[in-house]
Image: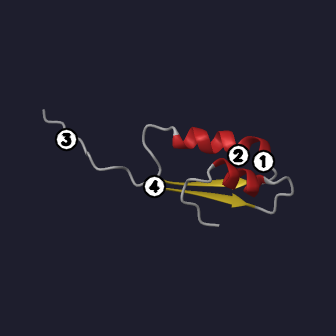
């Protein structure tokens, strides 16, 4: 019996819908980036939050490549 393992990185995309989650978005993103298999892209969809969710996400990851 032969086992074949794929050594190529997984092509994982993550979409995070957020609405008024400024208190949670930083922990959510840190948890995501600490996974053993990294995501190729992460998309945070801020649906008109009024608590600064988008700003907290940007603030937490100023050094990451972010498209807004």
Q: Secondary structure at mark 2?
A: helix
Is disc 2 in contact with disc 1, using a CB cutoff of under 8 Å? yes
Q: Quadrant of the rendered structure where residue 29 is?
A: top right
Residue 63 position within the rendered picture, expressed as x and y whole percent measured from the top left: 57, 53
Residue 15 position within the rendered picture, expressed as x and y whole percent measured from the top left: 60, 56
For marks 3 and 1, give the CA distance: 42 Å
Apparent side of residue 67 relative to residue 35 in the rendered image (left or right): right
Residue visible at 54% across and 59% down in the picture: 65
Is disc 3 in contact with disc 2, using a CB cutoff of under 8 Å? no
Q: Earlier in the sequence, mark 1 or mark 4?
A: 1
Q: Earlier in the sequence, mark 2 or mark 4?
A: 2
**Residue placed furthest toward the right:** 50
Dot 3 corresponds to which residue? 4
**Residue placed furthest toward the front:** 63
Q: Earlier in the sequence, mark 3 or mark 2?
A: 3
**Residue placed furthest toward the left:** 1
Q: Earlier in the sequence, mark 4 or mark 3?
A: 3
Apparent side of residue 46 relative to residue 68 in the rendered image (left or right): right
Dot 1 corresponds to which residue? 21
């Amino acid at each position: 019996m032969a086992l074949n393992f794929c050594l190529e990185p997984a092509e994982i995309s993550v979409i995070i819908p957020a609405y008024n989650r400024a208190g949670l978005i930083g922990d959510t993103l840190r948890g995501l980036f600490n996974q053993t298999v990294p995501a190729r892209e992460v998309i945070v969809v801020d649906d008109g939050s009024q608590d600064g969710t988008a700003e907290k996400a940007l603030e937490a990851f100023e050094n990451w490549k972010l498209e807004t």
